Amino acid sequence: MEPMDIVGKSKEDVSLPKSTMFKIIKEMLPPDVRVARDTQDLLVECCVEFINLLSSESNEVCNREDKKTIAPEHVLKALEVLGFGEYIEEVYAAYEQHKLDTLDSPKGGKFSGIEMTEEEALAEQQRMFAEARARMNNGVSIQKQPEADNNLES
C-alpha cells in the first residue's frame, strides 16, 4: 500500500489531531528533551501509516473469518501477523480499561442500563420534546392546535 493510499481520501483528509499528538509526544519524553517540529510531523505521519497498516491487516483477518465487522480480536490478531505480538498484552489491557471507562460514562452505550418499553421510551421522548419546545419559547408552553380546529373559520 502506498503511503496515504486510502480510498477516496487525499493526504490532507487523513490525519490525526496534531496538537493532541504533540502533547502525547511531549508527555512521553523527559522535560529537558526538545523535539523539532519536522520530527513531530514525521511522528504523526508514522502514526497515521501505522493505523492504516493495522486497519488494513485487521480487515484481512476479518475477511478470512467471513465476518463483516472488524472486532477487537481481529485487531489483536493483526498485531500478531504484523510482528507486533509483544504489544498484544498491553493493547488488550488498554482495551479492557477503555471498556471499563466507557461503561461508567454517560456515553457508555446506546441505552447504558436504561430499561424501558418502546411505549415508555416514546412517552419520554415526547415529554423531552415538550420541555425543549417550552425552553425555546422562553418557558411559555405553546400547544399545537389540531388541524381540524384551524379549518373552522373557512
Image (cartoon, grey):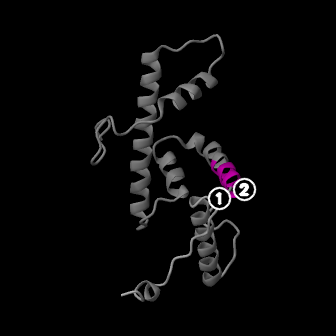
Mark 2–mark 1 distance (CA, rounded to whole Å)? 6 Å
Residue 134: image location, x then y, percent: 61, 65
Q: Residues within 10 Å of mark 1 (few under 14, many from 20)?
A: some
Residue 40: image location, x then y, percent: 47, 21
Identify the residue at image location x=63%, y=73%: 127
Residue 59: image location, x then y, percent: 40, 55
Which sits in the foreground, 94 or 133?
133
Q: Residues within 10 Å of mark 2 (few under 14, many from 20)?
A: few
Q: Give above or below for 31 relative to 19.
A: above
Which sits in the foreground, 107 or 41?
107
Identify the residue at image location x=44%, y=89%: 148
Quadrant of the snapshot with the N terminus: top left
Which sits in the foreground, 125 or 73?
125
User: Would you say residue 32 sits in the magenta stretch?
Assistant: no
User: Which type of secondary structure does the marked residue at label 2 adopt?
Assistant: helix
Q: Is residue 51 left or right of residue 108?
A: left
Name the outermost residue toward the front: 153
Cβ–Cβ below 8 Å for labels 2 and 1? yes
Q: Quadrant of residue 31?
A: top right
**Circle number at residue 21:** none
Identify the residue at image location x=50%, y=52%: 75
Quadrant of the snapshot with the C terminus: bottom left
Identity, as a three-letter code, of the amino acid under mark 1: Gly
User: Would you say residue 100 sits in the magenta stretch?
Assistant: yes
Q: Give above or below for 122 relative to 95.
A: below
Give the residue at mark 1. 108
Q: Is residue 104 left or right of residue 130?
A: right
Q: Which residues are magenta?
A: 95-105
Residue 81: image location, x then y, percent: 46, 47
**Circle number at residue 104:** 2
Identity, as a three-letter code, of the amino acid under mark 2: Asp
